[in-house]
């Protein structure tokens, strides 16, 4: 088995995390169009869209500093995967709830990715990037907690709308 250098691993980790963020951004933007009956949920997503754009800028800066750019193939594949997930949720009765659950889990996936990226950055002697990645861990944890707090209220609204014959999904 061939050995891989830390620079290659670091570049790959940055590209993977960036692709994950792009996928999340696209999913959030898609969801926002159908959340008019869930204003608190929409507000969390709108704030996190802006946070995610800042995270993407930090990842781009880190990639640029090591002479790399985002992987368009990787981003295309993750975008297609995200679209398939969104379509699968859209044909189900409880699309709003499934998107809420997926968003909650997704935040912790990002927390794990950034925590790992901190370790890789330190090993790659890119400690100047670590503060931004730690900030992302805090940002992702915060939004996961905000989404967690919405699970019961969104579910109640969903039930109220559904049981009264109103449109509960987008």
Image (tube, grey):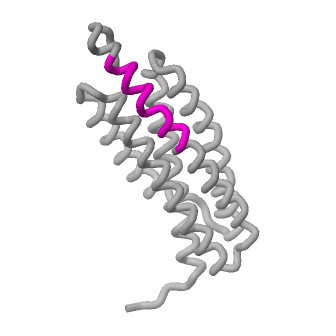
> Where 5 sits versus 116, above or below?
below
| Residue nearest the observer in this picture, 139 or 68 | 139
Up the image or down, 124 lies above or below 63; here it is below
Whether residue 148 sits left or right of residue 56 in the image: it is left
Main SS class of the magenta portion in the image: helix
Q: Is residue 110 above or below residue 122?
A: above
Image height of 153 relative to 162, above or below: below
User: Where residue 54 appears, x then y in whole percent?
Assistant: 67, 46
Which residue: 63% across, 80% down?
123
Q: Nearer the viewer, residue 110 or 6?
A: 110
Q: Residue at x 60, y 45 (%)?
A: 142
Count of marks, rendered view: 0
Image quadrant holding the C terminus, namely: top left
Determine if the magenta segment contains residue 154: yes
Q: Quadrant of the N terminus?
A: bottom left
Quarter of the image for residue 60 reads: bottom right
Q: Which residue is painted at 71% across and 66% down in the image?
A: 129
Q: What range is drawn magenta here?
A: 145-159
The front one of 10 and 157 is 157
- Residue 143 percent across, percent down from the top left: 56, 42
Judge from the rendering whether residue 132 lies leftward or rightward of residue 105; answer left or right.
right
Query: Where's residue 43, x and y in %?
Result: 57, 27
Q: Can residue 170 be seen in the rendering of this structure?
A: no
Question: What percent of the width, then of the height, locates residue 149?
Answer: 50, 35
Residue 19 part of the magenta-drawn span: no
């Amino acid at each position: 088995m061939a050995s891989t250098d830390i620079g290659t691993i670091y570049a790959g980790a940055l590209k993977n995390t960036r692709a994950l963020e792009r996928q999340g951004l696209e999913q959030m933007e898609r969801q926002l169009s159908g959340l008019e009956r869930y204003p608190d949920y929409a507000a969390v997503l709108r704030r996190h869209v802006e946070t995610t754009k800042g995270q993407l800028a930090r990842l781009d800066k880190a990639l640029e500093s090591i002479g790399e750019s985002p992987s368009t193939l990787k981003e295309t594949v993750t975008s297609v995967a995200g679209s398939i997930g969104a379509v699968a949720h859209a044909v189900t009765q409880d699309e709003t709830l499934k998107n809420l659950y997926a968003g909650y889990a997704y935040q912790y996936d990002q927390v794990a990715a950034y925590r790992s990226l901190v370790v890789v950055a330190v090993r790659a002697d890119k400690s100047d990037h670590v503060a931004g990645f730690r900030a992302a861990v805090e940002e992702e944890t915060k939004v996961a907690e905000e989404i967690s707090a919405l699970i019961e209220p969104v579910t109640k609204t969903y039930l109220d709308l559904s049981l009264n014959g109103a449109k509960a999904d987008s």
